[in-house]
Image: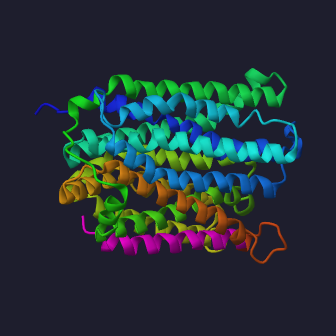
Amino acid sequence: MKRRIPLTTQIFYGVGVSYAIVDQIFAQWILYFYLPPENSGLKPFLTPVLISLALAISRVVDMISDPVVGYLSDKFNSRWGRRIPFIAVGAIPLAITTVAFFYPPMISEKGTFIYLALIGSLFFTFYTIVGAPYNALIPEIGENSEERLDLSTWQSVFRLLYSAIAMILPGVLIKYFGKGDTLVGIRGMVISLSILCVLGLYVTVFLVPEKKYSRPVEHVGNIKGILKEVVKDKDFRNYLLGLLFFFVGFNSLRAMMNYYVEDIMGYGKETITIASALLFGASALFFYPVNKLSRKFGYRKIMLGSLVGLIILTIALSLLGKVIPVKYGFLIFALLGIPISGAAFIFPPAMMSDISEKISKRINNRIEGVCFGIQGFFLKMAFLVSIVVLPLMLVLRGSGEVTKFGIYSSAIFSAVSFVISYVFYFKYNE
């Protein structure tokens, strides 16, 4: 049977998730740049409190922009489609605002604070203008669950690839561009990776013919009425709450890996890369099996099985060095990658695509953008919860410093989050 959407088109769609590069730059380098360690060769630009406040302001703007951009892309129509024009317009400004983070004015601390809050707000706005319509392309061009699953799988493959590039290449690029000057090196690294981000996005813009595969849209109502209809859907609510608690646990798990490798297992910083490679490498290896199993059993069953695995393995982490010898730590990280492959990468866009399709049919209104915008809101809420809770957990029974008790407690916190996620996904009716 001939594919309705050719394999090449699916791959070209996956290439467009290159905005994962600037996501990684933000996560890994903004705090380092504005509040650098002593031996970095950089000087601090702001106090920690002002950095946190500026980034919090930008995150609030980010959360508000998700459903708004989703709604606007639902209402938009052109000869190129509803989603592609947003990606085309947002790609270059996204790269520019990413670079702008690393050129703060040195006029005053207040001026730098306003600059960081403003650039952060613009960055996340353009990130949403690109990311929300990009994800909404899955139900836009995918006619059935199998097509949407394939598109989601290719997105996951390239997201992992881009994340790896953004984690591995910076050190090489900083050395190449800086030649001993850390500031010049970081700026050169960010500019080159931002260009790669734009190139990937334009592969999707020019080589994915949205209009050819999308279905006609008759009308889109006002955003207030649409949100009212969407939140009435019980399965959508259960999915969102399951997603929220899963990513609270997953974000916390990723953040505490460094502490486990150094403080619990007793290895140096260079070994952190090995732990990350094992986890994400195992995830990549299981993309294909997860795709096949999901076709046979559906998303819900595989998701529930993944959560059971995550609960068991995060509890095992809380016992590492106490009941379980530390030499098995790397094995646990590798095993964690198996359930994460579906739960963190493949399922969110694929499940959201099916849910948005179901709601659109029920209300006779194509609102995939709004649905993905709401999902984005919950993903960012999960990020906020994890960055607020985790620092408090890590210093438990200490006097401001990270403790082993705090690290073990963080693993339990992740396990509890996965348990709550399981409850909501169990209630979800696929």
- Number of numbered callouts drawn: 0
Q: Is residue 139 above or below residue 308?
A: above
Nearest the viewer among 344 and 315 is 344
Query: Residue 323 sits in which quadrant?
Result: bottom right
Q: Position of residue 125 (x, y in %)?
A: 55, 44
Measuring 29% from the left and 64% from the top, which residue is drawn there? 229
Q: Position of residue 321 (x, y in %)?
A: 67, 68
Query: Residue 103 sits in which quadrant?
Result: top right
Q: Where is residue 230 in the image (x, y as percent from the top left)?
A: 32, 63
Q: Position of residue 122 (x, y in %)?
A: 61, 41
Q: Main secondary structure of the magenta part?
A: helix
Q: Specify whether residue 416 is painted magenta.
A: yes
Work out which residue is located at the far bottom of the displayed protein and give it. 397
Instruction: Tell me where the magenta segment starts and ends, as one range.
Output: 406-430
Query: Residue 427 sits in which quadrant?
Result: bottom left
Measuring 19% from the left and 39% from the top, which residue is drawn there? 215
